[in-house]
Image: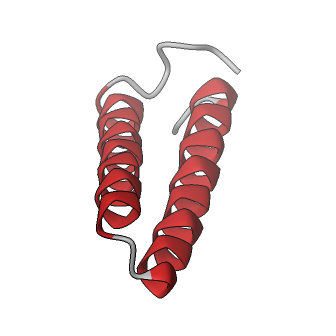
Amino acid sequence: MISETYWTILEHANRELALRFEKLKKARATGDPEGIKQARMEYLRALQVLYTDAQSAVSQPMRFKS
């Protein structure tokens, strides 16, 4: 079972990923290569954070007690 704290961390990381995805979609719509590159890097970083947080939550589910 994953602690409540980890759920909160994962929710935040997931929201951040969704925001970065929307920013990437908007950048792609403008066609600006630099904007797309920046938005892509931000999206990939948010994805990496979510992945790392998910790994931590699964490997140490009760590190933070509910």
Q: How many marks?
A: 0
- In this image, 17 relative to 7: left or right? left
Q: Quadrant of residue 34?
A: bottom left
Residue at the (61%, 58%) spot, across then down: 19
Residue at the (30%, 49%) spot, across then down: 41
Picture coordinates of residue 12 (x, y %)? 64, 41
Q: Nearer the viewer, residue 46 or 60?
A: 46
- In this image, 41 relative to 63: left or right? left
Residue at the (34%, 28%) spot, across then down: 56
Colouring scheme, one of rainbow, by chain, secondary structure, one colour: secondary structure
Picture coordinates of residue 32 (x, y %)? 39, 72
- In this image, 33 relative to 5: left or right? left
Picture coordinates of residue 26 (x, y %)? 56, 76
Which quadrant: the C terminus? top right
Residue at the (28%, 58%) spot, across then down: 37
The image shows residue 38, relative to residue 18, as above or below, that is above
Q: Nearer the viewer, residue 12 or 33?
A: 33
The image shows residue 38, relative to residue 22, as above or below, that is above
Q: Quadrant of residue 48?
A: top left
